[in-house]
Image (tube, rainbow, N blue to C red):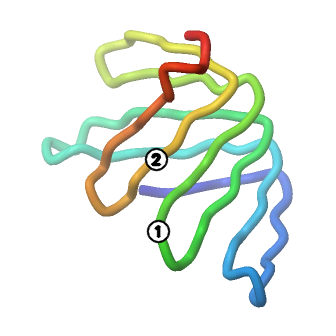
C-alpha cells in the first residue's frame, strides 16, 4: 500500500502521522489497485492502522464505489472497515 498527501505531520511521541488531502493506493494479490481518498488520515505506527476522516471515497478495482465519512484500514490483514454506526 502507498499513502500520498498534500501535507503530513509526524508526531513521534504519539507514534502517529496526521495527513491532509489523502490518496491511498491498496494493492491486492493480483496487483489490482483500490483507491481510497479522504480529507484527513491518521496512521498509527504501533497498530499499523490507518483511519480516514471526511468525504472518504473508495473505488475498487472493478469500479465499484463507496462513500462514507470514516474508514479504518488494517494494514496487517488488508481489511477496510466502516463501522455500522457510520452512514454509507
- In percent of width and height, residue 2 lies at 50, 57
- In percent of width and height, residue 19 lies at 78, 56
Q: Quadrant of residue 28?
A: top left
In terms of secondary structure, where does tag 1 sit?
loop
Mark 1 to mark 2 CA distance (whole Å)? 9 Å
Q: Which mark is residue 13?
A: none
In the displayed structure image, the side of residue 84 where residue 13 appears, left or right = right
Q: Residues within 10 Å of mark 2 (few under 14, many from 20)?
A: some
**The one of 24 and 46 positioned closer to us in this rendering:** 46
Looking at the image, which residue is at 37% across and 23% down?
60
Looking at the image, which residue is at 32% across and 24% down?
61
In the displayed structure image, the side of residue 66 where residue 62 appears, left or right = left
* Residue 16 vertical position relative to residue 26 in the rendered view, above or below: below
Looking at the image, which residue is at 38% across and 10% down?
64
Of the 4 image quadrants, the one containing the N terminus is bottom left
- In percent of width and height, residue 65 lies at 47, 12
In the displayed structure image, the side of residue 32 where residue 9 appears, left or right = right
Q: Which residue appears farthest toward the left when viewing the image? A: 30
- Earlier residue among tags 1 and 2: 1
Q: Which residue appears farthest toward the front when viewing the image? A: 85
Q: Which residue is mark 1?
A: 48
Q: Quadrant of residue 10?
A: bottom right
In terms of secondary structure, where does tag 2 sit?
strand
Looking at the image, which residue is at 63% across and 33% down?
37
- In percent of width and height, residue 17 lies at 72, 69
Q: Which residue is mark 2?
A: 73
Amino acid at each position: 500500500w502507498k499513502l500520498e498527501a498534500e501535507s503530513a505531520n509526524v508526531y513521534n511521541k504519539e507514534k502517529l502521522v496526521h495527513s491532509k488531502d489523502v490518496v491511498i493506493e491498496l494493492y491486492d494479490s493480483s496487483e489490482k489497485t483500490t483507491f481510497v481518498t479522504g480529507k484527513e488520515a491518521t496512521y498509527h505506527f504501533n497498530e499499523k492502522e490507518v483511519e480516514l476522516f471526511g468525504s472518504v471515497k473508495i473505488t475498487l478495482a472493478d469500479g465499484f464505489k463507496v462513500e462514507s465519512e470514516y474508514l479504518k484500514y488494517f494494514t496487517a490483514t488488508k481489511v477496510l472497515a466502516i463501522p455500522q454506526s457510520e452512514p454509507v
